Image: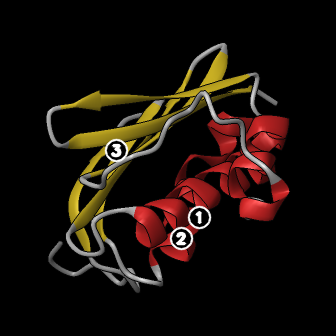
Amino acid sequence: MPGSTRPWTVVKDRMSENRMAHRIRATRDAPSQARRMIGEMSSNIGRGIDDVALVLSELVTNSVVHGNGSGDIDFSLDVGNSIRVEVTDRGAGFDPSKRPRSSDGLGLVLVERLAQDWGVSRDGDQFTVWAVLPRG
C-alpha cells in the first residue's frame, strides 16, 4: 500500500466496520503481524480482544508450522453477535475428530477452551480452521 508505515507485508487487504480480511506471507512473523492487524478492530471487538488475538495467533502459528511451508495465509474476522475467526492455508490439514492434546502443543487446546465452537473445512486445496468467540 503506497505510503503505508505497517511493519509487515500485506498481500491482500479488505476491511469494513464489522469485517476484516487479510492475506499475509507465511513467515515466522505472521502470528505477531496478525495480532497487530486486529488492533484496527478493537473498538468493535470489545473487551474480548485479548482472547480473539490469542486464538488468531494460535491458528496462524499452526498454519505457518503445519501448512505448506510457503506462500500465503488468509485470515478473517467477522464481528456480529459473536466473533468468527478464520485462517486458511494450502496445507494438508488435519482430522478434527482427534481432539487436541496438550502433548501436541497448546494451540488448539487454547482455541477449544476459549471458543464457543471451532472446526475445519476444506475447499479444493485450501484448508480453513475457524473459531467462534463471544463478543465482549
Does dot 2 land on a helix, a strand or a loop? helix
Q: Amino acid at mark 1?
A: Arg
The x and y percentages for residue 17 are 45, 33
List the residue tagged with mark 2: 31
Q: Is residue 117 left or right of residue 22?
A: right
The x and y percentages for residue 8 are 36, 81
Vertical side of 2 occupied by 19: above or below: above
The x and y percentages for residue 90 are 24, 53
- Dot in front, 2 or 3: 2
Circle 2/circle 3 CB separation < 8 Å: no
The x and y percentages for residue 109 are 78, 48
List the residue tagged with mark 1: 35
Q: Is residue 27 left or right of residue 54?
A: left
Q: Amino acid at mark 2?
A: Pro
Q: Residue at x 82, y 38 (%)?
A: 114
Identify the image quadrant of the C terminus.
Answer: top right
List the residue tagged with mark 3: 21
Is residue 71 shown to the viewer in this render?
A: yes
Mark 1: give few (<14), some (14-19) or many (20+) Cα within 10 Å: some
Circle 1/circle 2 CB separation < 8 Å: yes
Is residue 37 shown to the viewer in this render?
A: no
Does dot 1 land on a helix, a strand or a loop? helix
